[in-house]
Amino acid sequence: MDTIASLFSFITTPVSWVIVQFHKVYGAIFGPDTGWAWGLSIVSLVILIRICLIPLFVKQIKSTRAMQTLQPEMKKIQERYKNDKQRQSEEMMKLYKETGTNPLSSCLPILAQSPFFFALYHVLNGIATGDQIGVINESLLASARKAHIFGAPLAAKFTDSQSTVEALGATLMDVRVVTAIMIVMMSASQFFTQRQLMTKNVDTTVKTPFMQQQKMLMYVFPVMFAVFGINFPVGVLVYWLTTNVWTMGQQMYVIRNNPTPGSKAQAAYLERLTKHVTHHGKVRRRSEKTIVKAIVAKGRDRNEFERKFINALSKAGLAAQADGVVIKSESQAVAQAEDGTPTAGGTGTPKRQQPKRQSKSQRQSGGATAGAAKSADEQVSLSKSDDEPEDAKPAAPAKKAAQKQQPGAGTRSKAQSGQRKGPQRPKSPSKK
């Protein structure tokens, strides 16, 4: 531990100073020697650190989504160069460089808060051993040693002996019960956070090794917290429990308002957005406009949930625009179909008119007229092919012949249309 303390000594003094400042505020309310004053000081330190880490968290979300998008390409590279590990790593690095992604970006929040964690651990360990750390003087050290959270001192650990716990003014049973409950809550919050990410915010259409890795971490992290938690002081357990609860709430907000494309969370979000837009007739928030803009830009590459969203807007007489706004579409306005192409329902393209259904008599009379006209055209063409000049043969006899042949042609077509194919059975004589 001395080696770790020496590595993070540069941040021990700022952490202890922040805790002391919060302790002054809460000490004036709850009393300087109470567990509430020191416990809330640690919680406030966590909140302050996590607020400062929000930009890194946003970068982590973007990096995680970019990695999920690249999983199919990464799988192809692994299969193509499975016998050449060096070429495989080179192609992976080339892919990361082209897309601007970094696999380590998803670990940035954890890495960024690690120095604060070790500094806080060193401060609380100094309180347990009676050493002055940072700006914590003798009076603050004595006050912190008197502080108890539900009967457990801030510096007590699950593995402490009875004599050590009694020196801090508590009983071994109280310390172990409180630390065990906090370890279980810490592991459960970590498991729920990872499970929420796997079940709601992962693209279910892509099965990649990345998903298996995340599923494994869902079970590994809680076990790690349980194993290492028995060696953490109560104050550090308060720190980790608070940061896990913060992470869980922050992730719930991100999943609800900015879900991963193709996930169950996106389906629920677009369903809520559809009801909101169809009720108000427009998009209000900037984040909603950003999502609608991304959906419109995809065109034919939209997933199932995004196509349902566009179709629902079309049915409601609305149309999503390229800038993310939603406008009312007129009967001849340009809309977009599932695949991004214009449709006949709300576009300038006219609807195809289906021909009216004709009766049997109309179809038969139409066939007779067509047959007569055809025979007349044949006669005219034959007359034109003769040696005589065209003006020597009047067209009137051809027209008369066509008129004479028209009833016969109609009769034949009528008989043919009503006659069955193949041998026919003779009609039975009528009984009189």
Image: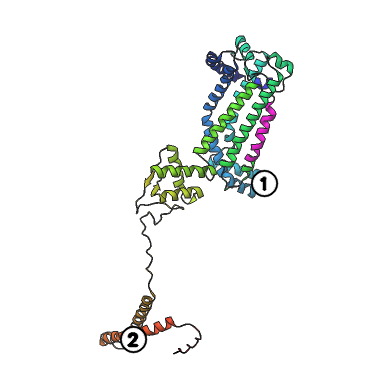
351 relative to 83, above or below: below
Q: Which residue is mark 1?
A: 84
| x, y percent for residue 4 | 66, 22
Element assignment for label 1: loop
Q: Is residue 293 visible?
A: no
Neighbourhood count class around disc 1 (C-alpha, 10 Å): few under 14, some 14–19, many 20 upward: few
List the single residue furthest toward the front. Answer: 432
Which residue is drawn at the image coordinates 44% and 44% (left, top)?
275
- Using residue 128 as the reference point, say whether residue 255 is left or right of it: left
Relative depth, front residue between 141 and 171: 171
Which residue is drawn at the image coordinates 63% and 17% (left, top)?
148
- Using residue 144 as the reference point, say whether residue 394 is left or right of it: left
321 relative to 19, above or below: below
Query: What is the count of numbered marks?
Result: 2
Relative depth, front residue between 315 and 389: 315
336 relative to 377, above or below: above
How far is disc 2 from disc 1 in space, using C-alphas? 85 Å
The main secondary structure of the magenta stretch is helix
| x, y percent for residue 286 | 42, 37
Q: Quadrant of residue 264?
A: top right
Q: Which residue is mark 2?
A: 405
List the single residue furthest toward the top. Answer: 139
| x, y percent for residue 290 | 44, 40
Q: Is residue 110 visible?
A: yes
Q: Which residues are magenta?
A: 214-231
User: Does the magenta run of residues contain 229?
Assistant: yes
Relative depth, front residue between 56 and 3: 56
| x, y percent for residue 167 | 70, 13
